[in-house]
Image (cartoon, grey):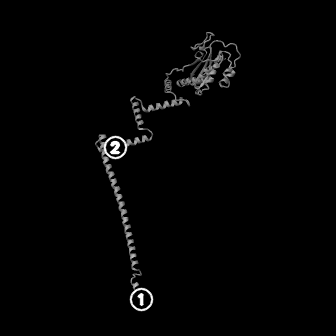
């Protein structure tokens, strides 16, 4: 029994190689082959990636080459077009023509970026051409436009519409006439408002009718302002006139005391008690002034009440006939406009030096 066992062990040992059986050796060989195959495949995969990358580079180079070729063909066609359009044959002249086109395109782009359209530019060029055709310098036209705008800003009132072009032209004409010394006297028209025209006061009173009050508050200031702007004046004189009928027996006048209060709108016009036509004319002028002062359009200007009493006819002659008749045309308000007398002018007028004997 022991002999058999030893014989079997000897046979088993004869089937071992380095302590491994034939099956184990085969498995080991297969594993080594797999490792070698994996290494080979990985190397081949790297070569394939490199080949694909080289192919992509080659394709890009080919595409660039085709693009360059197309541009060259296009440039040839463009060159032919430039030659046909410009009528030039010299290469340098054509190149200069092309550069000018590029520069022009750049200028147009910059103009569009500044907010000016090509159409507006063309219209501006046409305007300058027209000005030159009429022998008008464009720079001078711009300066004149700036001058007109400055006059407009100076003449326009806050919150009011711009001054009309005619008013500006009239102001410029007056300035030029004054500068040349040929202006003479250009007085604004007198605004007359008589009872004959529907502008009534209460009999022997300075109280205004409702219609007269509304006209003075709304319509008359606009008419006055138009004359102020047209004739460059700043003083508004309101003159009250009466007819020659005596005012009659009445109490003492309170005008000296109450006229300032009425002008400040602290008292009513109805509180005034004139004792004669001179006082009645002044009271009525004060009534008109008190209404005109309520309009903000006239805030900047001087408004002065005056009395012509019964002494001035409608034709501006003295009424010395002593005719106590009921004449509606003479019962009127006249609004006269003039320019302020500067302090330099008044200071230049000095009192004459009288001989000593006369002064005594």
Crowding at mark 1 (Cα within 10 Å: few <14, some 14-19, many 20+): few
Residue 302 appearing in the image: yes
Q: Position of residue 289 (x, y in %)?
A: 62, 23
Q: In this rendering, which labeled residue sits more in front, label 2 or label 1?
A: 1
Give above or below for 205 relative to 151: above
Give above or below for 20 relative to 155: below
The span from disc 2 to disc 1 (Cα, nearest Å) is 111 Å
The residue pinned by badge 1 equals 4
The picture quadrant where one finds residue 326 is top right
Secondary structure of the residue carrying numbered label 1 = helix
Q: Position of residue 221 (x, y in %)?
A: 57, 24
Q: Position of residue 224 (x, y in %)?
A: 56, 23
Which image quarter is the C terminus in?
top right
Between discs 2 and 1, the one toward the N terminus: 1
Q: Nearer the viewer, residue 209 or 236?
A: 209
The picture quadrant where one finds residue 290 is top right
Position of 60 with respect to 283 (left or right) is left
Secondary structure of the residue carrying numbered label 2 = helix
The residue pinned by badge 2 equals 98
Give above or below for 235 relative to 316: below
Contact flag, marks 2 and 1 (Cβ < 8 Å)? no
Q: Residue furthest right?
A: 251
Q: Nearer the viewer, residue 12 or 325?
A: 12
Crowding at mark 2 (Cα within 10 Å: few <14, some 14-19, many 20+): some
Residue at the image position 38 percent from the left and 29 percent from the top: 133
Q: Residue furthest front?
A: 1
């Amino acid at each position: 029994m022991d002999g058999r066992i030893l014989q079997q062990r000897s046979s088993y040992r004869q089937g071992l190689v380095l302590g491994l059986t034939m099956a184990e050796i085969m498995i080991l060989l297969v594993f080594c082959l797999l490792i070698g195959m994996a290494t080979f495949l990985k190397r081949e995969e790297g070569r394939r990636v490199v080949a694909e990358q080289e192919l992509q580079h080659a394709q890009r180079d080919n595409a660039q080459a085709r693009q360059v070729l197309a541009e060259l063909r296009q440039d040839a066609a463009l060159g032919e077009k430039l030659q046909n359009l410009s009528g030039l044959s010299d290469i340098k002249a054509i190149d200069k023509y092309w550069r000018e086109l590029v520069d022009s395109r750049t200028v147009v782009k910059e103009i569009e970026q500044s907010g000016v359209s090509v159409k507006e530019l063309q219209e501006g060029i046409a305007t300058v051409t027209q000005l030159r055709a009429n022998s008008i310098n464009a720079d001078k036209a711009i300066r004149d436009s700036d001058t007109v705008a400055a006059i407009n800003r100076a003449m326009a009132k806050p919150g009011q519409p711009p001054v009309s072009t005619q008013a500006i032209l009239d102001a410029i004409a007056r300035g030029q006439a004054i500068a040349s010394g040929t202006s003479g006297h250009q007085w604004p028209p007198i605004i007359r408002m008589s009872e004959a025209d529907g502008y009534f006061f209460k009999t022997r009173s300075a109280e205004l009718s409702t219609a007269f009050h509304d006209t003075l508050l709304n319509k008359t200031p606009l008419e006055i302002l138009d004359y102020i702007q047209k004739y460059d004046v700043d003083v508004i004189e309101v003159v009250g006139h009466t007819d020659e009928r005596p005012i009659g027996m009445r109490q003492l006048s309170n005008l000296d005391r109450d006229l300032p209060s009425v002008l400040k709108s602290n008292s009513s016009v109805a509180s005034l008690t004139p004792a004669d036509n001179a006082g009645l004319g002044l009271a009525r002028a004060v009534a008109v002034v008190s209404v005109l002062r309520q309009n903000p359009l006239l805030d900047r200007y001087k408004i002065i009440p005056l009395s012509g009493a019964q002494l001035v006819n409608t034709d501006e002659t003295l009424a010395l006939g002593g005719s106590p008749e009921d004449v509606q045309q003479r019962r009127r308000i006249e609004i006269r406009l003039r320019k302020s007398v500067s302090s330099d002018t008044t200071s230049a007028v000095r009192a004459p030096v009288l001989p000593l004997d006369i002064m005594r």
